[in-house]
Image (tube, rainbow, N blue to C red):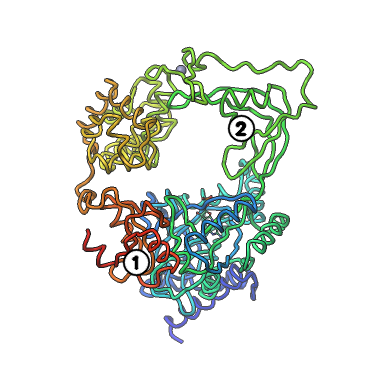
Amino acid sequence: MNTKQQIEELRKELRQHNHNYYVLDNPTISDYEFDIKLKELQVLEAQHPEFHDPTSPTLRVGGAVTKNFETIVHEHRMYSLDNSYSKEDLLDWEKRIQRILGDVEVEFTCELKYDGASISLTYEDGQLVKAVTRGDGFQGDEATTNVQTIKSVPLKLQGDYPPKFDIRGEIILTLDGFAKMNEERIAAGEDPYMNPRNTASGSLKLQDSALVAQRPLDCLLYSIVGNNTGITSQFQMLEKAREWGFKVPTIAKLCKSTDEVMQFVEHWDNHRHDLPYETDGVVIKVNKIQYQEELGYTAKAPRWAMAYKFKAEQVSTVLHEITYQVGRTGAITPVANLKPVLLAGTTVKRASLHNADQIAKLDIREGDTVFVEKGGEIIPKIIAVDLSKRPDDSTPTEYISECPECGTPLQRTEGDAKHYCINYYGCPPQITGRIQHFISRKAMDIEGLGGETVELLFKEGLIEDYADLYTLTKEQVLPLERMAEKSAENLVNGIAASVKIPFERVLFALGIRFVGETVAKKLAKAYKNIDALMSASSEELVAVDEIGERIAFSVVEFFQNEKNQKIITRLKEYGLQFELSAEKLLNQTEKLKGQTFVVSGVFEKVSRNELKKLIEDNGGRVGSSISSKTNYLVAGANMGPSKKTKAEGLGVPIISEDDFLAMV
Ligand code: AMP
Ligand code: ZN
């Protein structure tokens, strides 16, 4: 055997052992023997770099360091899931599905909802080429070098895999692995990590992949996306993934009815603590891929899948003190400071009390014993007061009447749940909050600048609004606490680089009340540039699809304000993007304005998603089911028969792919 063969033989053997150990949970050699073979391979590879292989098991050890995690746009968007909490919710969902699919029999695949960090893996010719975190669903961070070190992620596949596909899963820490990590940390005098989920997702952001390699991370897969995979059902998808070498829990079950689904849900709700990892529910998916395609997606989630959330866990603890936070819009949020208590794997110290009404409704007081619950959200909430434990000297909570930060009397407008500090330009947390929002990931995504530094810069009098960021110099920031040559440089460079951020995100970054990410996109698309938007009246704004009065008034008010106008003028001077890029403008028309289309079946010249994008790019709307408001049904091959009948019944014109393409 020559060296090349020897290397290849070792790789093959080690791959198999990895699979046996980490995927099948069934090792056939000792750890010691494994390590000897791995060392042997490492030595040979070091001597013979000419035989390099990007799928070698030695990559599992890590070592590569990532300085900057590159942002990657997902080829297929990573959606979130709608939630349900009861059998009734599921029955409602089933009805909605039947309305779209017509009278067909629908089966469901039930899987556990793994609680970790979602990841998308790309395989080409059976090799892992890319791993990307979910990010905002549209784009995430590349994490390939780190993911390569996770032993249950196959670097090379086996069997009849398609030439190119993405597979989605969840990176998790098992409870055992997590406990062991914490034991080691405590032994080393470090603070233990709070919970497995955050630790798993934090691991993907470590720069040194050798550190990631040491963590007992695992990757559980649940979905294959790509064209021509030959897969026809969700259940088959899981089996295929398993065959190709992925770790896919066998707990998944194919169910024929909602009753069967509920049995699965109830069983795992009772037994979830027997599992080696955390789960917060069950994911139920329409089994047939053809039906999944037919059902499609809402703006947020697939219509063909539903998460069933297990009931949250509760504990009781003592409320020490109620404090008040001021947000970037001036909104006051009361916060309950609790005696620390362990809840669903995390130590809880604080909980939101939302607003004055909530406090009054619960009649919650300092010194009370309260019940705390943790749902899916990160911040736990207080459900009730244990009145039997109320101290004798307890007095009702009096809500504050002045801003705790600047002393301005608080205001509450009718219809608002919250009190507001209206000292927009003088209240420190509002000023820094706006700047922090401006630099945040989904807004200007300024690297090298964090929330604490913003506070510091403000305290030192270096910035008063977000436009000031663009005049900062390295010399100015260098004297700040914890700043060094390099970090000062990164900060200034990060700010300078942000002038390339596209218009819709700049618009979101401005922090106009009620203008979130989606609304910002809508406005950018409708007005194309800031000048047009700034001169729009509220009547004009309301005419834009999905823009209501509340948003319209807020936009007009924002742009009427002279301070804001000045800031925008300055931002323009600094070179920020205040119009849609030429690329975005290209291919956009109003040809289909005011028209609603329903798309059904399979198409030849464009994919279903491309078709939907064409509709939207040309100003039309994509509807999910046929109603009297539908203008056209675009019909492809194998269109659902119920849709056809319905369209005919309502007199909705049915057009072909070619008819549609001719329209645009
Ligand atoms: P959410 O973020 O609560 O909307 O839930 C969506 C997330 O659930 C997805 O991004 C996945 O990362 C995660 N998830 C966990 N287990 C599954 C599963 N079996 N099928 C689909 N998604 C899952
Ligand atoms: Zn204030």
> Is 335 placed above or below 15 here?
above
Quadrant containing the C terminus in the rendered view? bottom left
User: Which quarter of the picture shows residue 658?
Assistant: bottom left
**Disc 1 and disc 2: Cα gap in Å?**
51 Å
Which is more toward the observer, 34 or 541?
A: 541
**How many residues crowd mark 1 within 10 Å: few (<14), some (14–19), many (20+)?**
many
Badge 2 local density, few (<14 within 10 Å), some, or many (20+)? many
Left or right: 235 as drawn, with respect to 127: right
Q: Which mark is residue 351?
A: 2
CB contact under 8 Å: marks 1 and 2: no
Residue at 36%, 61% in the rendered image: 599
Q: Which mark is residue 431?
A: none
Q: Which amino acid, mark 1?
A: Ala
- Residue 447 visible (yes or no): no
Query: Residue placed at 32% from the left, 28% from the top?
Result: 466
Of residue 1 and residue 157, the one placed in the foreground of this image is 157
Residue under numbered circle 1? 635
Does label 1 or label 2 sit earlier along the sequence? 2
Whole-percent x and y of residue 330?
A: 45, 23
Give above or below for 93 relative to 103. above
Q: To which quarter of the image does residue 442 belong?
A: top left
Taking 559 as reference, is 373 above or below it?
below
Residue 154 vs residue 186: left or right? left
Secondary structure beneath disc 1?
A: strand
In the rendered image, is residue 603 in sight? yes
Looking at the image, which residue is at 43% across and 81% down? 3
Q: x, y percentage for residue 196?
A: 60, 50
| Mark 1 or mark 2, whichever is nearer to me | 1
